[in-house]
Image (spheres, rainbow, N blue to C red):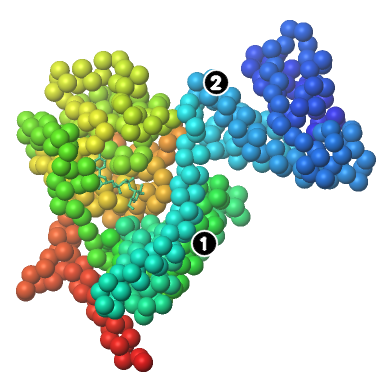
Amino acid sequence: MAQGHIIPFLALAIELEQKRGCTITFASTPLNIKRIKPSLPPNSSIQLLEIPFRSSDHGLPPDCENTHDLPYHLILKLVEASRSLKPSFHKLVYDLVRKQHGRLPLCIISDSFFGWCADIAHELGFKNSRYADVREPSRWSWYHLILKLVEASRSLKPSFHKLVYDLVRKQHGRLPLCIISDSFFGWCADIAHELGVFHAIFFPFCAFSTACYYSIGMSLPHRNNDSKEFVLADFPQASRIHVTQMSENLQGGHGAETIRKLVQDCMSIDGALFNSMGELDEAGLAFFQKTFGKPFWPIGPVLLPPGTGSRAGNEAAIKAVEVCRNWLDTKPPNSVLYVSFGSQNTVSASQMMHLAFALEASGKNFIWAVRPPTGFDINSEFKEKEYLPEGFENRNKASGRGLLVHQWAPQMEILSHKSTSAFLSHCGWNSVLEGLSYGVPIIGWPMASEQFYNVKLLEEEIGVCVEVARGRISEVKSEDIVAKIDLVMNDTEKGKEMRKRACEVRNIINNSIADKEEFKGASVKAMDDFLNAAMLMREEAKRTP
Ligand SMILES: O=c1ccn([C@@H]2O[C@H](COP(=O)(O)OP(=O)(O)O[C@H]3O[C@H](CO)[C@@H](O)[C@H](O)[C@H]3O)[C@@H](O)[C@H]2O)c(=O)[nH]1
């Protein structure tokens, strides 16, 4: 927004176009673009795009978009005001990519005053990815909406307050033993305490990954660090964490405020339950104990029995169980790879192609719970012809090597079948617990939230996982995926070791939930301790006038 900058920028754009054959889009504010237009050489196809800006909205005289138009004392104000261009520029870039059918620019070159463009460039993963899937409202806005939902859920408090009081009234004043709420509803503690009732959070995660997530959200360590890796000051047990192991919300910093509130909520709880096993989650549990000074009970794995999943009972689900079981019955023991990215995640279009090539090239039997790639509604129809290599489904159907399950796969049934050998998973914590409960080693491809740290725990601490890729925008090569599949499923040293370890972990899990007269597992004891603590509080409340 200064002639002294615009002129060399224009020169650079012309040089890159005419001498290097680059396709150039030149973006600036409307009046600057108007000024630049006549300066383009007649044979140039540089595209000029406007970023909306109204100087009068920023305490500047109207129609001032260039230092040239301003007295010296207002120049700093213009520089400050130019920061407001970011959201519009963000939209401009994404619209551009969408128009180019997901093809990303090679790079963004910004003026020295617009260093913030780096965030947008990195968000698109320019360095790592040739294609972005932004044909539909972008994946980022979807993530922003999740934060919005979390925020909105706070408004439930007054109604929940009323609900609890109505319930107590209906029960003639008899109080509940405790209120157990989700980690996003820590505010329930206020209502429980008003009634003198115990309040606990149930984390459907392991403590290790929740600790990483909370610690990163509270300190955003990548902000004060030039290197791409960091160690968490309050949780060094997690060892080195790479910025690519941060969810999009944390990388951009916009999830930090939500985490801060969640952590604050944790201060007033009486205790918390983790869906994990103490023996495998010691460091994370110690972090919570130390940080919040409350009891934390690992009561996991708490899993639905096979066949009772949320989609069970409907005809399609029953049919899917039958199809998968029959198909698996025809396969030798330990020969099938199961691929699924959980209930709310999917890979990008180019990643999906590479994954499909890899599954064919690996020569292994596989079941793949397919979902449309990013940019499409995850629950919409899966169009093989559009999303997968030509003839993929028919070829694999004919050879009997691969089974595609559209939409919802009977995951527990698949994982518990003796033919299943390995699980390529996004490592949502439920999937992890389900896989490990049946001694199935994992090929990890974390996508979001705490999944990156689940993989870390499973690979570095527990030894039942290898990571194959990270996130939706990283470039994956089919040969790398094949190498990881071979490593885990073939008779390699590492594969044997992982399978052995997965069976040991299955035994740890079985032991932890054993509830026999002669032996109570650690998770069962933890549940006893939790209920005792709640009862103790009730007794104390009765004694207090
Ligand atoms: O085709 C499918 C897909 C999923 N599932 C089931 O759905 C659940 C999926 O849970 P999970 O593996 O944890 O994945 P997400 O749905 O992605 O889980 C969210 O919730 C988890 C627990 O809180 C977090 O660990 C994740 O990061 C978060 O994405 C599991 O029980 C699966 O068995 C099926 O049965 N069939």
Numbered tag placed on residue 514 in the rendering? none
Of the residues shown, which amino acid type is indicated by label 1?
Arg
What number of labels is visible? 2
338 over 198 or under it: above or below: above
Of the residues shown, which amino acid type is indicated by label 2?
Lys
User: In the depicted view, which residue is nearer to us: 155 or 218?
Assistant: 155
**Residue, far top:** 43
Give the side of residue 308 with respect to residue 269, left or right: left
Position of residue 160 measured from the top left corner of the image (x, y, whole percent):
39, 64
Whether residue 309 is visible here, answered yes or no, is: yes
Please report the residue visible at 93 percent of the width from the left and 40 percent of the height from the top.
Answer: 71
User: In the depicted view, which residue is nearer to us: 461 or 446?
Assistant: 446
146 over 158 or under it: above or below: above
Whether residue 242 is visible here, answered yes or no, is: no
**Alpha carbons under labels 2 and 1: distance apart:** 38 Å
Mark 2, residue position:
99
Please report the residue visible at 17 percent of the width from the left and 38 percent of the height from the top.
Answer: 314
Position of residue 511 measured from the top left corner of the image (x, y, whole percent):
14, 64
Position of residue 52 measured from the top left corner of the image (x, y, whole percent):
71, 32
Please report the residue visible at 40 percent of the width from the left and 67 percent of the height from the top.
Answer: 161
User: Looking at the image, is mark 2 or mark 1 earlier in the sequence?
Assistant: 2
Disc 2 Cβ-to-ligand 1 distance below 8 Å: no
Please report the residue visible at 27 percent of the width from the left and 38 percent of the height from the top.
Answer: 340
Q: Secondary structure at mark 1?
A: helix
Mark 1, residue position:
260
